[in-house]
Amino acid sequence: MADFPACPQCGLDNTYADGAFWVCPDCGHEWSGEAAAEDALVVRDSNGNVLAAGDTVVVIKDLKVKGSSIPLKQGTVIRNIRLVEDDPAHIEGHSDRIKGLVLKTEFLRKA
């Protein structure tokens, strides 16, 4: 069985080749083979949802923050996240009380 890339728009693996393009029947997105190589880095939250820059996420567990006496409580909203280049396990963002956070995606869910 061939190794088909996941859809860069919805993140589902139900894709097929159509000539020089890849097609996702779930969301209807089409992309070229070169775009699949560029978008190989897919960032996912703890539930497997694809995260993109500018998304809002919620912390699913109380976390200690290095360099701060304020913990990050479960349910804290992190708005307008940024993806860390070449690292699908981390995102950058700000909470209401703590700025400049780098968080592991395993402790986040998409809001």
Image (spheres, helix red, strand yellow):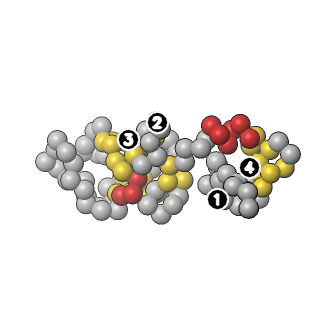
| Side (left or right) of 9 relative to 52 | right
Residue shown at 46%/46% (left/top)?
88
Residue shown at 40%/44% (left/top)?
91
Which residue type does callout 4 highlight? His
User: What residue did someone put label 2 on?
Assistant: 85
User: What residue did someone put label 1 on?
Assistant: 12
Disc 4 packing (10 Å; few <14; some 14–19; many ≥20): some
Q: Earlier in the sequence, mark 2 or mark 3?
A: 2
The reply to whether discs 2 and 1 touch (Cβ–Cβ < 8 Å) is no
Which residue type does callout 3 highlight? Glu
Q: Nearer the viewer, mark 2 or mark 3?
A: 2
- Foreground of the two, 26 or 13: 13
Q: Earlier in the sequence, mark 3 or mark 4?
A: 4
Residue shown at 24%/45% (left/top)?
97
User: What residue did someone put label 4 on?
Assistant: 29
Q: Is residue 27 in view from this perspective?
A: no
- What is the C-alpha distance between the residues marked 4 and 1? 11 Å
Q: Earlier in the sequence, mark 4 or mark 1?
A: 1
Disc 1 packing (10 Å; few <14; some 14–19; many ≥20): some
User: What residue did someone put label 3 on?
Assistant: 92
Q: Is residue 96 above or below residue 62?
A: above
Tag 2, which secondary structure?
Answer: loop
